[in-house]
Amino acid sequence: MKGMSLQDNLRTLRKKAGYTQAKDFAENVLKMSYSTYMGYETRGVWPSEETLIKIADALETSVDTLLGHYEGDSYVRKYFALKEKIEKLLEEE
């Protein structure tokens, strides 16, 4: 999964886990709308922390793997640091 985007990882891991249809995975496993899930898998929409954990659990993998984290890199730390900065900026408004 090294060097792959969240979108690529979602699609690859979903299929590897045996969920060939994204619609079935979204609606029956994750209990979310197909369009919401497809935002994550095809349109570059970033899921919330809670949703990332839910997807990782359903695919029996880690959030690190979903995000393409591998030794020597820190996508997870960068993601959460950026998220924290955005939340602080929104609070200031």
Image: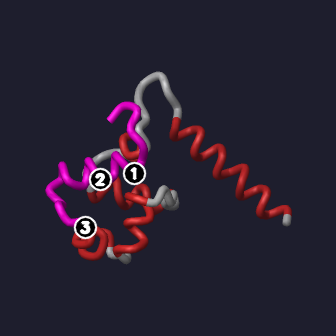
Q: Are marks 2 and 1 in contact (CB under 8 Å)?
A: yes
For the image, the number of numbered tags is 3
Label annotation for residue 7:
1
Crowding around mark 3 (Cα neighbors within 10 Å: few <14, some 14 to 19, many 20+) is many
Q: CA distance from mark 3 to mark 1?
A: 15 Å
Q: Residue at x 30, y 70 (%)?
A: 26
Task: Reply above or below: 89 against 34.
Answer: above
Task: Name the quarter where the N terminus is drawn.
Answer: top left
The residue beneath circle 3 is 25
Q: Quadrant of residue 34?
A: bottom left
Circle nearer the viewer, 3 or 2: 2
Crowding around mark 2 (Cα neighbors within 10 Å: few <14, some 14 to 19, many 20+) is some
Label annotation for residue 45:
none
The residue beneath circle 2 is 11
Q: Quadrant of residue 51?
A: bottom left
Circle nearer the viewer, 3 or 1: 1
| Callout 3: SS | helix
Q: Are marks 3 and 2 in contact (CB under 8 Å)?
A: no
Residue at the far top in the pictured view: 72
Task: Reply above or below: 32 against 19.
Answer: below
The amino acid type found where label 3 is placed reads: Phe
* Image position of 87 (left or right of 50): right
Q: Residue at x 34, y 46 (%)?
A: 9
Check if residue 49 falls in the magenta segment: no
Residue at the far left in the pictured view: 18
Crowding around mark 1 (Cα neighbors within 10 Å: few <14, some 14 to 19, many 20+) is many
The amino acid type found where label 2 is placed reads: Arg
The amino acid type found where label 1 is placed reads: Gln
Extent of the magenta region: 1-21
Q: CA distance from mark 3 to mark 2?
A: 11 Å
Out of 2 and 48, give the one closest to the viewer.
2
| Callout 1: SS | helix
